[in-house]
Amino acid sequence: MKPNLGNKDKQTDLVLGKNLIAVKSGIQANRALTNSVIQLAKQISVSPDLIGVLVLEDPQMTTERLKSEVEDIWRVLKNDVARRLRLVMVRDKTVTELKGKLDQSVSNSLRQRLSSLKPGEKTVLPSPDFYFVILQILVNQWMRKSGPVSTKWLMETAGCSYPTVASALHRLRYSLTRRSYKRVELRRFPEEDWYKLAAVSERFRSTIRFADRSGRPQSPDELLRRLRKFTQLNIAVAGTMGAKHYYPDLNILGNPRLDLAIHAPQRNVDLSFLDDIDPGLKRIDDVGEPASLVVHFVRSAKALFEKGGDHLPWADPASCLLDLNEMRFEPQAREFIENVSKRNRNG
Amino acid sequence: MFLSGTGMDKVVSGKIIEQVATALPKECREHIIIIGSLAAGYQLFRGDDNLQVQTKDMDCVLFPQLQAAEYGKDVAAKLISEGWKQKFDGEFNAPGTSETPDDKLPAVRLYPPGETDWFIELLTVPGSKNDQEKEWTRIRLKDGDYGLPSFRFLSVATFKPVGTMWGVFCARPKMMALANLLEHPRIGPEMIRNSPYKRSQKDVGRTIAIALLSSDRLETWIELWLESLQACFPHEWKMLAARAGSGLREILGKDNDLSLAHDSCINGLLASRQVNLEQFRIAGERLIKFVIEPLEARIQKL
């Protein structure tokens, strides 16, 4: 019997003989893991010959937590189905079999796929948190004094459905002013909500840090000069440089690093251009280590970047503000909020 | 002037250049271009005596080629009269005669008075045809015949040299870097005598070291590289420019060769720097990204 791979129930990415292979990238919650296993279990349950292979690519969970969750799920699965399920984790191009043993053909195919991946293609972003996306959009509008926006505009700009927008607006109701024609705007800076966002901003923006390994680091200005050659419209200058664009009197001497905002409504991003900017930049995981270049992803459907003339675009003020928060420039962040919004109010 | 070390000694480039230049006949100084580690160190470490290079020879290129024999004769005579001693070794253990073929003549190599740690060697720029890998210009000294060697890409290495306060010139590091790359389109097997290194490892490695130490933006090298290639090789410059990065790319792809190149530089131009292999590799990769690739792109557009 052929497996049901019709559009409606299609969960698998590849069929190899009797193996139905599903690939899940950047999975970060137990619920998503459970759903993926159940969907695959449902598919192989239609025929006793079928084997289900779930490949977890770069899961956003620790291996220990993943293993513990997997044990919990396996405990409730029917023996017959559990016996025919395989669970594989792929992290840093290393394949780890968490449950069951892969057929040689599946194993070869997986390794072939991994070796053909370019470094840039490996960056897979998790699904965006639309509450924070909408909060950032509204703060941005507030700082720019752009006036009220409609729910429809929010849906299109954030890239989410009406219920998601409605739910976010409900959470923000105490900071909002509702206008006619279902338009809303922030009546004040939503301090409490913003600091909740700032606290998780690295995860929210899938921040990636790069440090110099050459021993002769390029200055942030030099990195930016090289970046200008890459006229990709989806990259904008953020961080202290971006903040100074909106408020030149910001009390920060020089620029400690180059922050970039990359518009990435999709989940796969290619960062290979960074190697062309400077081969001395290497990705680091230690947040305590000083970074030369930091990349943040803007996950809304539309980016609110500002055109930069012959320069790269400037990231939106709210992105720059998050960067200041992240760099612990708290007094400067407050100064930035006050002055940018005042300037726009007056101007 | 010297610091004790293992094998060769570390030297302050400027002091050695001064010692040699002031010993040379005044009228010859403006016809001499110093090349190699000392010339590179003199410019890359200028003003900082804490930064030294480790070397055993100082190559002095006489120019123009037509008068090189005459200047070479004057230089050797003056230095020998001041106590410099001939250095003979291997199969070249005596001066040649008028019967000795040009390519069998010993080079003029002289130890300074009372020292055997380092020596100077006289060379000359290639003739106008500029198409021989190596050629010799015969020079007759009191004790016999010698040869001034010339290598094909010395004309590039000595292109637009910089002057020094002692009258002699120094080759520009970026031009020596290009000459080394042109000399080694492949990481060839030829070993340096009495050394664990291949000639190609040492020369391409030195190019990486120059890139690493250079304070100017690497992209600025491209204009002078193109100018020199067009001037020195008017018929072949495009082909030479297009292949300039091949040896560098090869060494960056071969861990063992790169490691030996790094070793040779740690015992040379990088003697005063703590540069690890990863930093050395990045310097090579930057050279590819910032100079070689834009150079190749320029050639393609022409």
Image: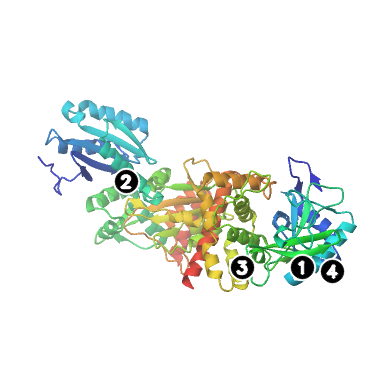
Helix, strand or loop status at disc 2? helix
Q: Quick check: marks 2 and 3 in contact, CB under 8 Å?
A: no
The percent coordinates of residue A186 (x first, y second) are 35, 55
Helix, strand or loop status at disc 1? helix
Label 3 CA crowd tier, 10 Å (few <14, some 14–19, many 20+): few
> The numbered mark 3 sits on a residue in which chain?
B
Q: Measure the alpha-carbon separation of dots 4 and 3.
A: 30 Å
Whether callout 2 and callout 3 share a subunit is answered: no
**Left or right: residue B148 compared with residue A116:** right
Whether callout 1 and callout 4 share a subunit is answered: yes
**Left or right: residue B135 compared with residue B294:** right
> The numbered mark 1 sits on a residue in which chain?
B
In front: B150, or A73? B150
In front: B161, or A321? B161
Label 4 CA crowd tier, 10 Å (few <14, some 14–19, many 20+): few
Q: Measure the alpha-carbon separation of dots 4 and 2.
A: 69 Å
Task: Check disc 1 and give the amino acid type.
Answer: Ala
Which mark is drawn over residue A113? 2
Of labels 4 and 3, earlier in sequence is 4
Q: Measure the alpha-carbon separation of dots 2 and 3.
A: 49 Å
Which mark is drawn over residue B131? 3
Query: Which residue bears the numbered disc 1?
Result: B68
Q: Quadrant of residue B227?
A: bottom right
Which mark is drawn over residue B27? 4
The percent coordinates of residue A123 (x first, y second) are 38, 48
Of labels 1 and 4, earlier in sequence is 4
Task: Check disc 3 and give the amino acid type.
Answer: Asp
The percent coordinates of residue B99 (x first, y second) are 76, 62
Q: Quadrant of residue A179?
A: bottom left
